[in-house]
Amino acid sequence: MMFGNDKRGKLFRKEKGVKKKDVYDMLLSIGPAKKVVIYFLSILLVIIYMLPFYWMFLKMFRSSIFAHFPPDLNPFSLTSLGNFIVNFRDVISFGSFPLWYFNSVFVAVLVVSGSVAVGSAAGYAFARLHFKGRDLLFYAVLATLMIPFPVISIASYIFMLDLGWISTYQGLILPEIVSGLNVFIFRQYFMTIPVDVENAAKLDGLNPFQIFYRISAPMARPAFAAATIYTFIGTWNNFLWPLMEVHSQNLFTLPLVLNFFKGVNGTQIYWNEMMTVVFLTLIPTLVIYILFERYFVEGFTLSGVKG
Amino acid sequence: MAIELKKLNMAYGSTVALKDFDLHVDDGEFVAILGPSGGGKSTALRIIAGLVLQDSGDVIINGEVMNNIHPSERNVAMVFQNQALYPHMTVYNNIALNLRMKGIPKQEIDRKVREVANIVGITSILDRKPKEISGGQAQRVGLARAMIRDPVVYLMDEPLTGLDAKFRDEMREELIKFHRITKKSIIYVTHDQIEAMSMADRIVVLNNGIKIQEGSPRDLYDNPEHVFVATFLGSPAMNTFRFRKSTEDPKLFILDSTTEVSPFGLEFADKTLPDELTVGIRPNDFILSDDGEIKVVLQSLEFLGSVIQMRVKLGDSELIITVSRESRTKTDIYDLKPESPLRFSVSSERFYIFGPDDRRLKNPIIKVHPPEAIMKKTQGK
């Protein structure tokens, strides 16, 4: 053996992004008076954010669509579970609910994978490749972030009409795959990866495409997580585009389905069933968030984007 | 000859990174390219590796022109600053990737990986990820990853930058050992003159893309041909003073920052000398003596173990002087207070005289007089 075994040397690695530990350390360094204010505000925020969920549970555990007086504010009672099972059965047998659920999942999966694939490749190109007009093109991509969807919705609709893609899966999916935000997230992340790692790969005999998918992409996991969560939530909750694009019930996604439960002409609202649908709709979002949560904050702080 | 560079030119926009840069490296030679950051040394290394394409000039490796050959086929290996290991791969896979890309059979790869891991002493961490190992271990993984390719030359780009000072000393020793064991050429880029002086067989000093001087560490230290080399090598750096020719006596030179005539008691016998000169004196070439011709005022004094480093004022210029702890004066050296006057002498062969273009003057004939004599001479006029 040529060298002794030494554990003393330390490389000064620059810590990137915000770690949970940093937040805890920050909290510990704050004085008690400030702490009270911070905790009070945090608890207030939690209550505000949790109220709709409380209401969702309240309603999905009821059998009747009518309000009682005095109102019963405890969502959990002896009949709760039974009520929920009845509501659940009613919901999944309503129209083609399983198909609609499948539509939502199908569209979301394809949009997320397509958008992340395109976004990461484009972001990598903007971060690493040198070509004429690169920066101008990148600014053009950034500019698309500033245009709200309703502004281009009619143009998009006419475009789909010309392609004959109205009320088709491709019409529902393809326009959503193009995401300036994802390109931006990936570009910013790839720019933080040291060029020398890629140079080392080049010397090891990898071609640019291999460098991308064997070296750089695996290093950009936080960006992939952030883009996946962001795109998934956006697509899963998307209401306006499916509303315009889909003319047949066979292509309905969950946000459109929810619309049914508000009743005809708004006269009768089936709160208990509606909230059961809301609950079922929430599950995949929660699963995605739990799966990718640990990369999520890092991904967004690094790209300098706030969700 | 392992590596030859011929008239390399490279510019990034209007910034010149290399200008007509020539270099030859013999088989088994350890060459350091030394210079300040932005001096073009890293660019030179990247051009050899093929990571950067030069504007003009040739890269010849083992007798073959490699200008348009892909980095992976140039038979060179690079060790990067901060190692640039693949963070998502284990140490084993970091080392093995190159052989995998070449399609070498698994057992062969395994044998080779274990062989180099054994040489650099990282067998026990092969299964770990780069973030689970120490900086020194990462260093060795970087070496192992380079070694497995069995290259003609190792290109090292400031590999010790980022390690803490104490550990850097140990790694220097290990790199010297590494060189002795592999017997391969090494081109080592650094801005740290101590690294270059302690490891290299030959040093090439590069500044603003231009080769200033090359030679053995000792040669560069003893015979710097340029102010830049003189001040860059050696620690603390050489003191330099700008002199201009006296209008009254062409033999006399006046220190720029004072009105005092030649505080060193220098007289140049050569009348063809240029109007401006730079005089350099290494801090350790000053000899403390009570009748020395250089009169200075002490500013501060640091005890550094075997030597004592003084900051003193000569006219308006500050300079650094190191003396051995055995030096004696009228007063005990440890009793000296700031503002104490001190006298030093410097023997005439210890003056480094540079012309206005910062190049060393060839044999300027100089005499050292006691300053009083010179003062009298000028006052007499």
Image (cartoon, coloured by chain):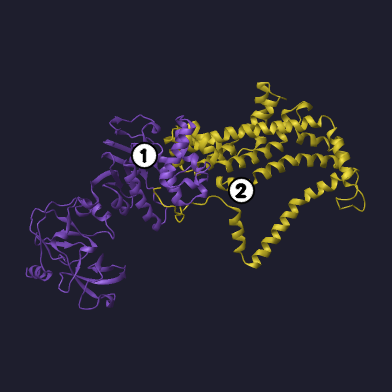
Q: Where is the C terminus of chain B found, in terms of image quarters?
A: bottom left
- Check disc 1 and report its element: helix, strand or loop: helix
Q: Are marks 1 and 2 on the same chain?
A: no
Distance, label 1 to label 2, CA atoms, is 36 Å
Most foreground residue, A209 or B360: A209
Residue A64's mark? none
Chain identifier matching the yellow colour in the rendered picture: A
Q: Residues within 10 Å of mark 1 (few under 14, many from 20)?
A: some
Q: Is residue B14 visible?
A: no
Residue B87 image position (x, y, % from top left): 51, 43
Residue pointed to by mark 1: B46
**Label 1 lies in what chain?**
B
Q: Residue at x 11, y 71 (%)?
A: B372
Residue B361 horizontal side relative to residue A297, left or right: left
- Check disc 2 and report its element: helix, strand or loop: helix
State which quadrant residue A34 falls in.
bottom right
Residue A295 horizontal side relative to residue B212, left or right: right
Q: Is residue B312 visible?
A: yes
Most foreground residue, A214 or A233: A214
Residue pointed to by mark 2: A297
State which quadrant residue A94 falls in.
top right
* Mark 1 in CB contact with mark 2 (< 8 angstroms): no
Whether B233 is drawn above or below A263: the answer is below
Chain identifier matching the purple colour in the rendered picture: B
Q: Amino acid at mark 1?
A: Arg
Q: Residue at x 16, y 59 (%)?
A: B244
Whether A292 is drawn above or below B323: the answer is above
Q: Amino acid at mark 2?
A: Val
Q: Residue at x 30, y 46 (%)?
A: B32
Residue B98 horizontal side relative to residue A280, left or right: left
